[in-house]
Image: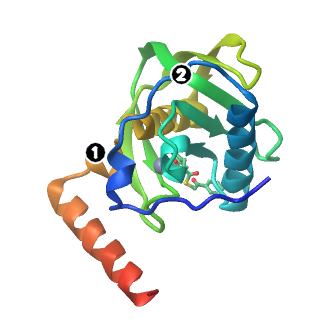
């Protein structure tokens, strides 16, 4: 297994749109394992393939307290959503920035697992928020894009400054 490099906002590659996975192969499973290891090491509760510069529709999520409930979604699609929730979000690609985003409170998502089998999952609360956040990554959208232009400008400047200081 390997820990992958996570792209940092405002990297342009975070805006690429991921493509459908046509066949779940051993190399898909290797990527999923590496993504899970990267997410747990960060630490985070989710990770999209986009964030590790792989532009395929794959996300991993684990919102359990004990880090023992890894969920793998290949080609995820939200088939129903209801309610609204304003939840504080963070992002491993936007370190140190947290803000509230309005999302659906409950969703039903269909996807394939790491064996390529289709499944459907109903999610609420943090799990639902996290799946929506990761699915946005697959569309090239980062959560800060829900914030005001003023906040986005400040966040971009702050992260660029931090990047310069670490070079
Ligand atoms: O997409 C990502 O970068 C992962 C992101 C997922 C997420 C968190 C909160 C709301 C929506 C989506 C993170 O995991 S940020 C880190 C984080 O929230 C966390 C880290 C350690 C323990 C618990 C949470
Ligand atoms: Zn994120």
- Residue 76 located left or right of residue 34: left
Q: Residue at x 46, y 86 (%)?
A: 166
The local crowd at label 2, few if under 14, some if 14 to 19, many if 20 or more residues have their Cα within 10 Å, is many
Task: Looking at the image, tell me whether mark 1 or mark 2 is earlier in sequence order.
Answer: 2
In the image, is 102 to the left or to the right of 117?
left
User: Which residue is situated farthest in the left direction here?
Assistant: 149
* Image position of 8 with respect to 129: above or below: below
Nearest the eye: 2 or 63: 2
Which of labels 1 and 2 is toward the front? Answer: 2
Res. 57 visible in picture: yes
Q: Which residue is mark 1?
A: 146
Residue under the point 64% across and 38% down: 60
Q: Where's the C terminus, which quadrant?
A: bottom left
- Graded by Cα atoms within 10 Å as few (under 14), some (14 to 19) or many (20 or more), the crowding at tag 1 reads some
Between residue 90 and residue 9, name the one nearer to us.
9
Tell me the CA gap for discs 1 and 2: 21 Å
In front of the other: 18 or 46: 18
Residue pictured at 39% horizontal, 81% vertical: 162
Look at the image and tell me whether residue 62 can be seen. no
* Residue 136 against residue 119 in the figure, above or below: below
Residue 81 place in picture, x, y as percent = 44, 16
Q: Secondary structure at mark 2?
A: strand
Percent position (x, y) of residue 2? Answer: 74, 57
Residue at 57% over, 37% down: 126
What secondary structure is marked by label 1? helix
Image position of 98 (left or right of 146) = right
Residue 146 higher or lower than 74, as above or below: below
User: Is ligand 1 less than 8 Å from the beta carbon at label 1?
Assistant: no
Q: Quadrant of residue 111?
A: top right
The residue at which mark 2 appears reads as 76
Residue 19 image position (x, y, % from top left): 44, 28
């Amino acid at each position: 297994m390997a820990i992958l490099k996570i792209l940092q906002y405002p990297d342009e590659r975070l805006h690429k749109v991921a493509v459908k996975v046509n066949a779940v192969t051993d190399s898909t499973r290797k990527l999923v394992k590496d993504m899970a290891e990267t997410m747990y090491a960060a630490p985070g509760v989710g990770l999209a393939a986009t964030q590790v510069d792989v532009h395929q529709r794959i996300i991993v999520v684990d919102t359990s307290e004990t880090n023992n409930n890894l969920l793998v979604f290949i080609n995820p699609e939200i088939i129903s959503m209801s309610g609204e929730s304003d939840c504080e979000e963070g992002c491993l690609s936007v370190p140190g920035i947290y803000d509230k985003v309005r999302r659906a409170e409950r969703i039903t998502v269909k996807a394939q697992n790491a064996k390529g089998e289709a499944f459907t999952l109903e999610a609420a609360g943090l799990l639902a928020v996290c799946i929506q956040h990761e699915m946005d990554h697959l569309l090239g959208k980062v959560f800060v894009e829900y914030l005001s232009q003023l906040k986005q400008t400040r966040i971009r400047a702050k992260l660029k400054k931090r990047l310069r200081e670490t070079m």
